[in-house]
Image: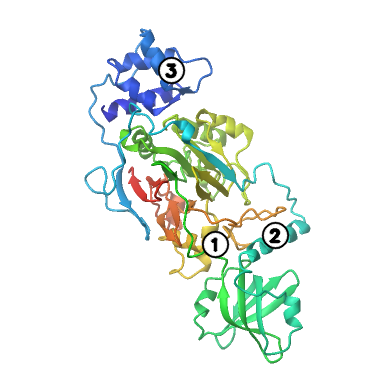
């Protein structure tokens, strides 16, 4: 079946206000007269329907209804292949930034997806086999008022939850108890980093705070653990062990521990071959939104090669937004924020109607900037209702057929990259900054910096359970790798370089769609530009 035919069918259905299941598009394209079949499907669509289903198309074909007029611009089945399927680079154990991989001349390299069976070109399995659950969603749960007690509560909750992950590694004593211990005693403590500074001799003085007080800890510059001090951010939770000075006024640190992901961690996998596409930062409404690349991606999702891609996870910034950065209005193609979401909804209709879609907001979206961010309000949900996407807060843990995916837009990556040495975190290798968040078991450890944080009754930003996949966006750079068996993916963007991005030296990775095999956690990169 020529790809050009399915491409035109999808676009024509979208023009009429419908999205469609992939098998429905396949049935229309394989009809003796695709133009007539499409017209029949549109004319017989039930009132209020937003999706053309396979059953609906079969009914239309059986009725053999003659349309009143042929819709314009639909190929009758003789179009040549458009060749818009994305090229791929497959990797079983990714470990370095994807950047802009060299695409081979063929359609794919590495593992070829298993051929779909018994579905006449449709999805690889009965949709009843799919499952999605969401945890950690702030939507409808926000109680913070910004009062002083709210800040106390959220930091107390952070300390209690992260300290539990460290208590098996040290015999913690409260700061107040350590202050009463005799000099030269061995001591161990868990606390939030209150301050980090170097001494005149080049050693590191780290102040740790728990619920009872603050205690100073000294890391000597010649210690191997001194390199770990360079990774510390204010407000993160760590543990130390060492020996008190003679006057018991300071703790000389011998070992330093992060909550971290256990090296023995083994991720869960799905019990069938099924795939998820991970994307972010679509930025519809920007003059630099790459519409052709998006349509090529959506067209590919309708092909047999993408038969196992049953889930689409979007990690924020559906639209460009309004007033996000100085002079942004000069770079907008759509000025009104609601029109931006309406336009995004139209592009979303190009995606197969039987895909499961999960979306979280980002800093360009029309929700509060402070994290955790609730999901979109009812008005925006209604605008984007055609695909019946699951909309949840930022961050959220989405479990798909047993595989947990921590979705976080990623604003705190700016903070991590700014504060840590380049070899630890950089924009060219965003997955390394993600490793730091996994190591700290918190998606936004530092308070009061570049990232706006909202105090709640509990800290929604801690990573209580280790995810199988960690998915972020925001920095518009592609990066992926494994950290203690957790697959970390920053999925790039769908927006070419804007004037603002050029002014701050951001060179985006555009039009990538990382595809994850949920049964193996292998990753394939597809590029559509």
Horizontally, is 204 left or right of 311 in the view?
right
Asked if 183 appears above or below 154 in the picture, the reply is below
Q: Is the Cβ of the residue at disc 2 closer than 8 Å to that at disc 3?
A: no
- Estimate the x, y position of residue 513 in percent, counting from the top left: 39, 45
Q: Considering the image in quadrants, where does the C terminus appear?
A: top left
Disc with the residue nearer the chain's start (3 vs 1): 3
Horizontally, is 392 left or right of 478 in the view?
right
Rendered image: mark on residue 415: 1
Q: Is the Cβ of the residue at disc 1 closer than 8 Å to that at disc 2?
A: no
Rendered image: mark on residue 157: 2
- Estimate the x, y position of residue 412 in percent, counting from the top left: 55, 58
Residue 67 visible in the current orientation:
no
Mark pair 1, 2: CA separation: 22 Å
Disc with the residue nearer the chain's start (1 vs 2): 2
Mark 3 or mark 1, which is nearer to you?
3
Residue placed under numbered mark 3 in the picture: 56
Rendered image: mark on residue 242: none
- Estimate the x, y position of residue 481 in percent, counting from the top left: 41, 58
Q: Residue at x 42, y 59 (%)?
A: 482
């Amino acid at each position: 079946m020529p790809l050009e035919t399915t491409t035109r069918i999808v676009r024509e259905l979208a023009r009429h206000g419908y999205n469609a299941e992939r098998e429905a598009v396949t049935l229309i394209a394989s009809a003796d007269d695709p133009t007539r079949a499409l017209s029949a499907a549109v004319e017989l669509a039930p009132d209020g329907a937003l999706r053309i289903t396979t059953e609906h198309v079969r009914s239309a074909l059986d009725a053999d209804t003659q349309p009143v007029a042929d819709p314009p611009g639909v190929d009758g089945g003789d179009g040549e292949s458009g060749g818009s399927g994305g090229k791929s680079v497959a990797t079983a154990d990714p470990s370095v930034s994807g950047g802009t991989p060299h695409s081979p001349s063929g359609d794919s390299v590495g593992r070829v997806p298993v051929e779909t069976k018994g579905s006449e070109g449709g999805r690889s399995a009965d949709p009843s086999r799919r499952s999605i659950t969401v945890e950690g969603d702030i939507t409808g749960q926000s109680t913070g008022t910004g009062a002083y007690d709210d800040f106390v509560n959220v930091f107390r909750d952070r300390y209690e939850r992260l300290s539990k992950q460290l208590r098996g590694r040290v015999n913690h004593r409260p700061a107040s108890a350590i202050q009463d211990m005799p000099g030269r005693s061995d001591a161990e403590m868990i606390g939030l980093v209150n301050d980090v500074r170097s001494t005149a001799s080049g050693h590191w003085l780290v102040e740790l705070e728990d619920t009872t007080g603050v205690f100073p800890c000294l890391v000597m510059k010649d210690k191997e653990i001194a390199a770990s001090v360079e990774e510390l951010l204010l407000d993160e939770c760590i543990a130390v062990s060492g020996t008190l000075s003679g006057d018991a006024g300071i703790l000389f640190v011998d070992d330093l521990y992060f909550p971290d992901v256990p090296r023995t961690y083994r991720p869960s996998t799905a019990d069938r071959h099924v795939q998820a596409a991970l994307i972010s930062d679509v930025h519809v409404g920007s003059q630099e939104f790459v519409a052709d690349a998006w349509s090529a991606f959506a067209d590919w999702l309708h092909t047999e090669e993408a038969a196992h891609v049953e889930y689409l996870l979007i990690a924020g910034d559906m639209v460009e937004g309004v007033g996000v950065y100085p002079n942004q209005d000069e770079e907008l193609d759509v000025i009104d924020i609601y029109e931006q979401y309406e336009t995004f909804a139209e592009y979303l209709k190009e995606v197969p109607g039987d895909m499961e879609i999960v979306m979280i907001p980002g800093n360009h979206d029309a929700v509060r900037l402070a994290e955790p961010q609730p999901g979109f309000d009812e008005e925006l949900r209604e605008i984007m209702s055609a695909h019946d996407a699951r909309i949840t807060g930022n961050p959220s843990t989405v479990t798909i057929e047993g595989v947990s995916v921590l979705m976080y837009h990623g604003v705190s990556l700016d903070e991590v990259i700014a504060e840590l040495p380049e070899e630890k975190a950089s924009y060219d290798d965003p997955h390394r900054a993600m490793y730091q968040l996994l190591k700290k078991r918190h998606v936004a450890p530092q308070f009061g910096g570049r990232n706006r944080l909202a105090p709640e009754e509990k800290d929604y930003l801690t990573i209580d359970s280790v995810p199988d996949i960690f998915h972020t966006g925001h920095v518009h750079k592609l990066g992926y790798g494994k950290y203690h068996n957790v697959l970390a993916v920053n999925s790039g963007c769908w927006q070419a370089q804007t004037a603002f991005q050029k002014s701050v030296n951001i060179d985006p990775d555009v039009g990538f769609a990382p595809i994850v095999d949920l049964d193996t956690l292998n990753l394939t990169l597809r590029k559509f530009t």
